[in-house]
Image (cartoon, rainbow, N blue to C red):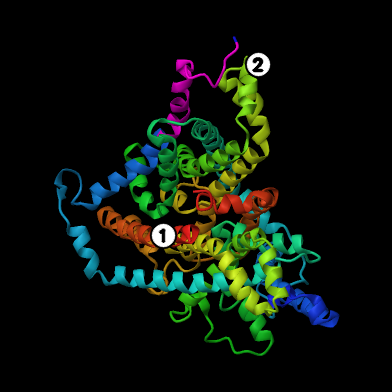
Amino acid sequence: MIRNNKSPSRPRRETALPYLLIAPTVAVLLALSIYPLFYAIRISLQTGTGDAARWSLANFARLASDEFFLEALAHTFIYAVVALTFEFLLGLGLAVLLDRPLRGRAFFRSALLIPMMLPPVVVGVVWRLMLNSDFGAVNGTLKSVGINTESLTWTASPLLALGSVIAVDIWQWTPFMFLVLLAGLQAIPQEPHEAAIVDGSSAWQTFRHVTLPLLKPAILIALLLRTMDLLRVFDQIFILTEGGPGFSTETVSLYIYRTAFRFFDFGYAAAMSFVLLLLTNVISVGYIRLLQKQETA
Amino acid sequence: MNETPNTNKADPRRRGLAGAKMSRAFKYILLGVALLAAIAPVYWMVTISLKTEVDQFASPPRWFHFAPTLEHYYDAFFTRSFAKYLTTSLTVAGLSTICAVTLGTLAAYGLARFKLRGKLDQRLSLWILSTRMFPPIVTAVPLFLMMRDLRLLNTIGSLVIVYTALNLPFVVWMMRGFFRELPRELEEAAMVDGDSRLGALFRVILPLVTPGLAATAVFCLIVSWNEFLLALVMTQTDASMTLPVGIAGRVTQYEIKWGVMSAAGVVAMFPILAFAMAVQRYLVRGLSLGAVKG
């Protein structure tokens, strides 16, 4: 029974085998990722339920004039842009700090990743405890050094709430940027670096003109992955503020959740979720184009 | 802050030894601040879970000096339902991981080792990856309605099914990568020795990818354990809700029991931290998956 694998006439069942291996996975994904998408398209194009359901574009027409939706969209953008900026800058700083051998590097690397690993719900609990205006550790510490914390109600204040939830996001996800960028830095060969230094470039010039360009693919990947997550943010905000006070921290995902599971307007919720999907896709395609340009350049 | 660190990249010979020492001290200060920022809030939650109510609400806050008590853990896990939520979380995470890893590994092998007609293998791989790109809220609404129609709401089964689908693309891509790193000659040799293709997979290939397989499984466990939105949507009864949903329910109640909430938070956190440390080596690959290899 010696089989020569390179012979053109392979046994027949060998050609069926890959399909058999792949089929269950494809079936599960069709049932639980693709079918739901079509289901959502259908309900977004209907008004009324059951026998009274009729086809209409009303759900989509409503989007443009729904102030709450537009405001949630604005919150989502602000949240994403501010958090992404800070996470990137802090993450890059930390990555550069730990790029070179340093005593205790492995320890710092592991310990700094902890926030990212926590269940989002636990992050919510942690920061509710920290930011509570009366008994939280933040205000308690500020008070003990003599700062008046009366107006610093963080997540309970309409003015500070959005900033507070953004700060929590930065706390949790800077480690992600740090990790991906550190991996990127470590993959960069040392020679161009050394050559630049021999040529008399300053540390900053070397970083700016040698390291950063070489790091660009890793940067784009880190930004792409974070952007996609930021646009869909839900968990921490739900625990910290539930979108409040008022509407001040309501993002698109939270508004969709509320529309579907508090007001039971599934059709409209589905319509909004397609806007979110479209937005995420357009932005990630943009990143991927940049990335491909990078690779061919 | 971003420019300063790379002073260390300059050659110490040029900057002088004193300069190198200075910049090292400065590095440690910055790292210390970052470490404190990362750890202190988590540490605070742990202390709250161990404090009596008097100590919890003390002003100024007591970071170190308090009389530790386990009453909140007892309260959460014996007098309230958190033990039930914990069991549910463990069951759901365990079962969905087993399903996803089994199905996904087989598919990954098929996609890594066979050239299908019309580049179907590559197209399928990309399609599988793309299903992971949907924001969860997009599928949450229709999945809720589907589960309602199937009368599966508030069952552990619904979460196992949904989490299996959630993890599958990830498993396929991780394992496809690991399989591709192995030379084809391995199976060919085994098949020459009389093994069938599947025999070669189980006897020769799987033992070689065990570390990667374990890391992949751990990632699935983490994702399932941490997942919140879909669990929130699909399980609302005490008998079916996972730990995150249980905690969230307590957090958003009118009267918050800080100690109970923190105790539950600590219990939800520890398995994940242990797991995460176990898969550190694969972290970057896991996290940037698809984007790097796609």
Task: Estimate the x, y position of residue B101 in percent, counting from the top left.
Answer: 55, 36
Element at badge 2?
A: loop
The amino acid at mark 1 is Arg
The amino acid at mark 2 is Asp
Residue, disc 2? B193
Front residue (pair B170, A53)? B170
Indicate yes or no whether the magenta region holds residue A5. yes
In the depicted structure, whether residue A258 falls above or below residue B237: below
Q: CA distance from mark 1 to mark 2?
A: 47 Å
- Residue most toward the right? B17
Task: Estimate the x, y position of residue A227 in percent, counting from the top left.
Answer: 46, 63
In the depicted structure, whether residue A206 falls above or below residue A56: below
Label ID, residue A289: 1
Label ID, residue A191: none
A72 relative position to A95: left or right: left
Task: Estimate the x, y position of residue B220 in percent, counting from the top left.
Answer: 56, 44
Please name the residue shown 70% across and 63% down the image.
A190
Task: Estimate the x, y position of residue B116 in percent, counting from the top left.
Answer: 43, 31
Front residue (pair A196, B277)? A196
Please name the residue shown 46% across and 31% down the image.
B115
